[in-house]
Image (cartoon, coloured by chain):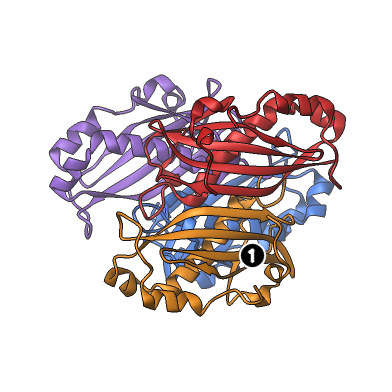
Chain colours: A purple, B orange, C blue, D red
Amino acid sequence: MKPAAHRLDLDNYPLHVTVPSRFRDLDTLGHINNVAIGSFYEEGRARLNRECFPLEMRKRHSMRMLIADVHIAYLREAHYPGEIIVGAGIGNIGNTSYRIDLALFQNGQCVGVCETVLVNTDGKATAAIPDEGREALEAVRVRGG
Amino acid sequence: MKPAAHRLDLDNYPLHVTVPSRFRDLDTLGHINNVAIGSFYEEGRARLNRECFPLEMRKRHSMRMLIADVHIAYLREAHYPGEIIVGAGIGNIGNTSYRIDLALFQNGQCVGVCETVLVNTDGKATAAIPDEGREALEAVRVRGG
Amino acid sequence: MKPAAHRLDLDNYPLHVTVPSRFRDLDTLGHINNVAIGSFYEEGRARLNRECFPLEMRKRHSMRMLIADVHIAYLREAHYPGEIIVGAGIGNIGNTSYRIDLALFQNGQCVGVCETVLVNTDGKATAAIPDEGREALEAVRVRGG
Amino acid sequence: MKPAAHRLDLDNYPLHVTVPSRFRDLDTLGHINNVAIGSFYEEGRARLNRECFPLEMRKRHSMRMLIADVHIAYLREAHYPGEIIVGAGIGNIGNTSYRIDLALFQNGQCVGVCETVLVNTDGKATAAIPDEGREALEAVRVRGG
């Protein structure tokens, strides 16, 4: 995955989450482990999903979002100690699914990007994203795409 | 915590769980991370709790076990790749609480021991361990103590 | 990522690693967490890299493999307790990079697939994969592709 | 372990580290997992060791600190999302070993305490803590003990 230029600029992401790296994120190579990097993106997804789909909305529509696809590009090594800023926004909105676009920044540099496709379900089968949820997703699209 | 001699012998533990170490368990020092070691002990506790308190028993008595205290002694470094055998058994049984004694073995050597105190609750307050649960705990006491 | 049919059959992967799931892999939804799934794929990659590039070969050629890209498709929920079998093999071999194709199987069903692009470096810049390494990669290609 | 009263007051710890909880810290019970709690204490230890034993001091004296013993009391459940403040200080200083006392605070309440015994080694055998390191440890003792 070769990220488009606008994906490398934190200003283009409507949501920012600051996550300090932890010693436990390191691996034997001395930088933040590739799998541990996944938990930084997870923080960005969790924040976006909480903001767009509050608990009451999820109950009202029996919404349960499942991850279908995660694609990560590793651009630079990330370090400990130090904070990572996760940028998150919406890249695409379908009928039953949507794509969250994310990027990680450390010391002003983009260290990686991620695309995650999530599918809405009613707990059993895929289900259309309700209109109020769709509006919330529209409001946090990544800019410049 | 200076472990008693009988705690260093796998044969004294009635339950054994084999857990391969994972690359993600390593830290920057090149051995299995001290926090990651905790997840090996957790596997021993989970196995013991499943065997002594089957789901139906938990529902019948509204049991919910909470960990109150964990004490770990690190005796040797543990390595990857390689399997760790977790030995688990009961060290003590009280009215509302019990102690699980655990040890980790790699390549025939004890690399660490752990004592965990768990408290039984009904979801709100501490509660007496039901008799059928107490009998199950008695049956898996660590030997030689 | 829509996986090709041959990617869903464990028999097509030359390397198999059995990894028991751990309680710590679970998340609040009660199935194995999406990020934790990444550590199963990591076990498959680590095994393949150890087999194809023994430590002496890495030293001889100053090889250091870095992950550039990870793409995961989540096909089914994975559960605890229970073993996961990781299938691993080579999907593509370039001049300085190669792609490891992986899949996870639980109870005979494919629960997910992953493609990982790794780049060989000499610690500073990308470097051609040495011939003996290339031969080792060729020997473990995924079948049926 | 029944913690002394002064251990439950953040003001008594000379070092504070703020660590946001992560979704990956949760387990199937919906609160922060007991093993994951260990990584919060690890952040407090890492901070204290970095401050007391800068890299140059470690090299000068061939210092390598190993954890010998970790004792954790779980006092309350910890939650996500939300920050945890780790309080860290020194509880005891021996000839070759020292004890780091830690506590976790969330929403103004102490959710747990931890004592960790570390042993200084020269990479092979235990070694006396050098005087300059001992002075640094003295400067960050937990107050009120």
The residue drawn where x is 81% and y is 38% is: D95
Q: Choose top left, top right, bottom left or bottom right for residue C44.
A: bottom right
Q: Which percent across, then down, holds residue A24? A: 58, 42
Q: Which percent across, then down, holds residue D48? A: 65, 30
Q: Chain of mark 1?
A: B
Residue C50 visible somewhere in the drawing: yes
Q: Which percent across, then down, holds residue A102? A: 41, 33
Is B49 on the left-hand or right-hand side of B126?
Answer: right
Give C12 or D5, whichever is nearer the viewer.
D5
Give C141 or D145, whichever is nearer the viewer.
D145
Categorize mark 1 by other alpha carbons within 10 Å: few (<14), some (14-19), many (20+).
Answer: many
Is C123 on the left-hand or right-hand side of B46?
Answer: right
The residue drawn where x is 21% and y is 49% is: A63
Q: Choose top left, top right, bottom left or bottom right for residue D107.
A: top left
Quarter in which the C terminus of chain A is drawn: top left
Q: Amino acid at mark 1?
A: Ala
Residue B72, compared with residue A77, is above or below; it is below
Q: Which percent across, then down, holds residue A101? A: 38, 35
The residue drawn where x is 35% and y is 39% is: A46
Q: Secondary structure at mark 1?
A: strand
According to the image, label 1 marks what residue? B103
Residue A25 visible somewhere in the drawing: no
